[in-house]
Image (cartoon, helix red, strand yellow):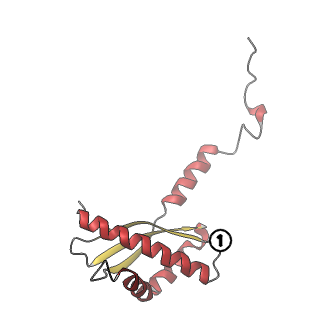
Amino acid sequence: METQRQKKIGGVIQKDIADILQRAATDGGLRGTLISVSKVSVTTDLSQAKVYVSIFPTAKAEELLQGIRSNQPLIKHELAQRTKNQLRRIPELAFFLDDSLEYIDKIEKSLKGGDNPIENPDLLDKRKKS
């Protein structure tokens, strides 16, 4: 069970890291790549933060996650600059891939299936006129 303080700090970190990562992607020539932070959970002692990132398109996700992890000290430093008035200590950041968007996408595709009655109305039986 997260305390109010953990949630608050998680929220601050989430907003700033999302901004940092999206700016880094744009500056790094990755236009059209969407990086969002879906969740941040902070440990009770506020020393660690698990950061869950969603990356779209998903084809580059694993590669970008490696890049994010290798730049963790830089990201932490940038976060410290932004939150120096709110946080005394910046937790250690651990980045994980949140694949829920990909999961939702797969569900939608399987629900739609190959036959789409909107594109091919002949798939549906004609309604009888009363």
Q: Residue furthest top?
A: 130
Quadrant of residue 111 within the rendered picture: top right
Nearest the camera: 90 or 67? 90
Point out residue 92 in the picture as x, y percentages from the top left corner: 32, 81
Q: Is residue 113 above or below residue 80?
A: above
Disc 1 target residue: 32
Tell me: 70 left or right of 11: right
Dot 1 amino acid type: Gly
User: Residue at the location (58% across, 49% down)?
Assistant: 108
Where is 12 relative to 74, above or below? above
* Image quadrant where residue 39 sits: bottom left
Image quadrant of residue 31?
bottom right
Query: As drawn, is 13 to the left or to the right of 109?
Result: left
Residue 48 position, x and y percent, is 29, 77
Residue drawn at x 47%, y 72% as measured from the top left:
18
Q: Secondary structure at mark 1?
A: loop
